[in-house]
């Protein structure tokens, strides 16, 4: 697996951008954001 430094550098390259996002998503398991709508 690449280091985070190289993944960030890959984000700036159009050819490597999609793969870098995929690799980052494998590492970062972020809980989905719940969007609550307020009713006025």
Image (cartoon, rainbow, N blue to C red):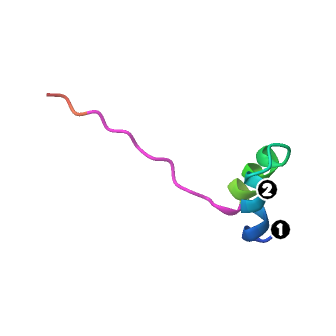
Q: Is residue 32 left or right of residue 27?
A: left
Q: Is residue 20 left or right of residue 29?
A: right
Rendered-image quadrant of the N terminus: bottom right
Give the mark toward the camera: 1 or 2. 2
Residue drawn at (72%, 50%), measured in percent from left and top? 21
Query: Where is residue 15 shown, x and y percent of the image?
Result: 85, 44
Rendered-image quadrant of the C terminus: top left
Query: Tag 2 or tag 1, which sits nearer the N-term?
Result: 1
Q: Which secondary structure, mark 2?
A: helix
Mark sitting on residue 32: none
Q: Is residue 15 left or right of residue 36?
A: right
The residue furthest top is 40
Numbered range of the magenta stretch: 27-37
Question: Mark 2 packing: few (<14 Cα in 10 Å), some, or many (20+)?
Answer: some
Is residue 1 part of the magenta span, yes or no?
no
- Toward which corner of the image does residue 5 lie, by quadrant? bottom right
Is residue 36 part of the magenta span, yes or no?
yes
Give the labeled residue for mark 1.
Answer: 2
For the residues bearing labels 1 and 2, Cβ distance under 8 angstroms: yes
Q: Which secondary structure, mark 1?
A: loop
Residue drawn at (29%, 33%), measured in percent from left and top? 37
The total number of labels drawn is: 2
Residue drawn at (61%, 59%), measured in percent from left and top? 29
Is 36 or 13 nearer to us in this picture? 13
Is 20 or 34 nearer to us in this picture? 20
Marks 1/2: CA–CA distance? 10 Å
Give the labeled residue for mark 2.
Answer: 10
């Amino acid at each position: 697996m690449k280091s985070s430094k190289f993944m960030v550098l890959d984000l700036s390259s159009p050819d490597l951008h999609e793969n870098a996002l995929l690799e980052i998503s494998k590492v970062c398991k972020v809980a989905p954001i719940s969007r609550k709508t307020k009713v006025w």
